[in-house]
Amino acid sequence: MIDQGGQFRPLSPAMPITEMSSYSIPGTLLPGRREALPDCARSSRLVCLISFILIQHCSICHHALAGSQSMDGEWLDQKNSDRGVEKFQNHTPSCRKVFLPQHVNVGEGPFQFNIRALMGCEISDSVEITLSYPFVLFVINPDTGIHPGPNYVLLGSGAFKGIGMTEVYLKLARLTPGEPGEILATIKADTGIGLPLMGHGTIEWSQFKIDNGSDFSAVVPPVQVSYSAKPARPVLDLPGAITTNSVVAKWFSNSSAENVSQYHLRILGATGEVQSATATALQTSMNVDGLASGTDYTLELAAVNDAGESEPAEVMFTTRFDPSSLQVEALLRALSRDWDPLVEHFGTLQSAVPSPVDFNHDGKVDDCDALAIIHNFLNQ
């Protein structure tokens, strides 16, 4: 039981659990109701008790629910608590750093690849990068092979050759505001004598220091370089708008040297392919509709040129739940699967895909979202 001061205490014999529906808790009114507790005749006593604990624990959630939020995160009515809703909508999510992988397929002669910014937090000042690679596989000239991105200027560069390895250093400073996934620099390289023999190799990061702060080199995926005429596996961006029945697939263009003619996109469900489409070589996004609400899917993307089709890149996502058809069991399963009140400091592209039960769009799934589920359940 929760006492008048908002503290939890055991039920006493004088107050059996059947009397919960008339017990008043100050300051926890649900929207559109005069009594403090929801109508427990419409739900289990356990659901009622959980909702009270969550309300007491999460004041921001309570302000949000005062604005009568729908299941897809859209606000229906702000008149009950404009101040609380404004506080909730302006909530700044914690920063989730996501670094994109790079895949490059090369034939004879030189090749190039882009170093892209992390997806989560913008670089505000500068970045220092050191590339490390076997010198028999690649050749990067620090004087002619480093080209800063459109929003950056190159402050310095250099190279050091060690035992079997070469390191290339570059420092970039921001000139103009950018965006997530922006190009920091384009690196032009040549194939060494070993790459055609081995067929593949990697360019590692010895340093990836942002704004003179933390070094993220340990978590940035290496550049995967393959000796092949087929295109490299595409690099997916975070999906755009995910609705109850659609998703916007987004990706970054393959290197122009791979002569990609088109991209093949597939949406896979539990029983196989449910949607497929073809995009032109110039496209970097596509809207796919006709999906079911609250359903898990895998998005696959492959690049095509005259030599064949690349290995597919993939990312999983779940469509939003339809508020007019509440899927209680599916909601609770998604809540259990995605529960993560502490946003990671860094992660993969997959870890940054929005959850269908992140109702307040703050980048994490916690008690605020659980309360939104209970609130909508009680008001069905």
Image (spheres, rainbow, N blue to C red):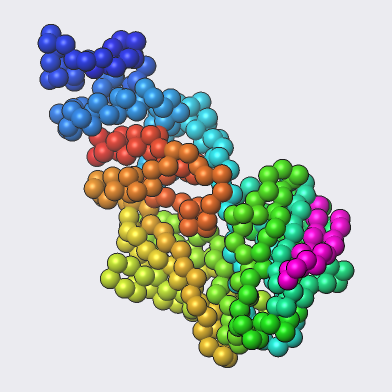
Magenta segment: does it hold 49? Answer: no
Which residue does the image show at 50% across and 52% down from the upper left? 352
Q: Is residue 330 left or right of residue 160?
A: left
Q: Is residue 299 above or below residue 356?
A: below
Quadrant of the frame with the C terminus: top left
**In the rendering, at what x and y percent does residue 98 appear?**
58, 53
Q: Is residue 259 visible?
A: no
Q: Is residue 94 above or below residue 200?
A: above
Query: Which portion, as a residue range, is magenta?
Result: 155-173
**In the rendering, at what x and y percent does residue 327 appear?**
25, 49
Exactly how many numbered labels are in the figure?
0
Quadrant of the frame with the N terminus: top left
Which residue does the image show at 41% across and 56% down from the upper left? 243
**In the rendering, at what x and y percent does residue 356 appear?**
39, 50
- Give the overall secondary structure of the magenta segment: strand
The image quarter containing residue 214 is top right
Q: Is residue 326 left or right of residue 266?
A: left
Which residue does the image show at 77% across and 49% down from the upper left? 126
Magenta segment: does it hold 172? Answer: yes
